[in-house]
Image: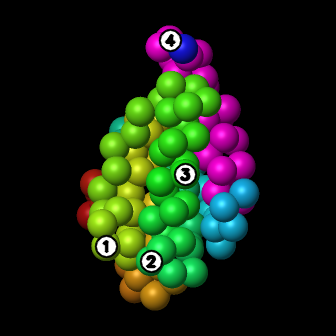
């Protein structure tokens, strides 16, 4: 299965990510198309978990599913605290927040308004 991840388009990867997040009861899932806006990836997904424990569990299960199902390895930041976990799959950046932390940073608002941190 070593070459499997190269056969998956970013759209197919997005569907797998959204499916994993939904099955783990992530809340307020938003996807942002980054194509043409940024070189960091094709899509960004932002969602919330109800607690630090759920944020960590959602993140862990997503990383495990991508590795098992399509051989995609992901880089993970922030899992130890469970407030905000960033998962970099290469084509897609996933942010899993506790609701208060998400409200504070409002990361999807920044990207949806057409501004990227690169251009500010």
On the question of residue 14 being in view, the answer is no
Could you say where residue 12 lies in the image, as x and y percent from the top left?
67, 32
Q: CA distance from mark 1 to mark 4?
A: 33 Å
| Residue beneath the point at 51% across and 81% down | 51
| Residue beneath the point at 48% across and 57% down | 59
> In the drawing, what numbered circle is on residue 47?
none
Q: Are marks 1 and 2 in contact (CB under 8 Å)?
A: yes
Dot 4: element: loop
Q: CA distance from mark 1 to mark 2?
A: 7 Å
> In the drawing, what numbered circle is on residue 3?
4
| Residue beneath the point at 31% across and 73% down | 81
| Residue underneath mark 1 | 81
Dot 1: element: loop
Could you say where residue 64 lies in the image, as x and y percent from the top left?
51, 42
On the question of residue 18 being in view, the answer is yes
- Stretch of the chain drawn in magenta: 2-22
> In the drawing, what numbered circle is on residue 52?
2
Could you say where residue 28 lies in the image, as x and y percent from the top left?
65, 72
**Which mark sits nearer the N-terminus, 2 or 3?**
2
Q: Are marks 1 and 4 in contact (CB under 8 Å)?
A: no
Could you say where residue 94 lies in the image, as x and y percent from the top left?
48, 54
């Amino acid at each position: 299965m070593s070459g499997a991840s190269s056969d998956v388009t970013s759209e197919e990867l997005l569907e797998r990510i959204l499916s994993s997040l939904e099955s783990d009861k992530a809340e307020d899932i938003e996807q942002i198309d980054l194509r043409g806006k940024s070189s960091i990836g094709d899509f960004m997904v932002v969602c919330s978990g109800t607690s630090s424990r759920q944020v960590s569990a959602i993140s862990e299960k997503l990383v495990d599913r991508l590795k098992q199902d399509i051989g995609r390895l992901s880089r993970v930041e922030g899992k130890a605290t469970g407030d905000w976990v960033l998962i970099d799959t290469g084509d897609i950046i996933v942010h899993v927040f506790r609701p208060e932390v998400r409200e504070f940073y409002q990361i999807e608002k920044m990207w949806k308004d057409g501004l990227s941190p690169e251009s500010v």
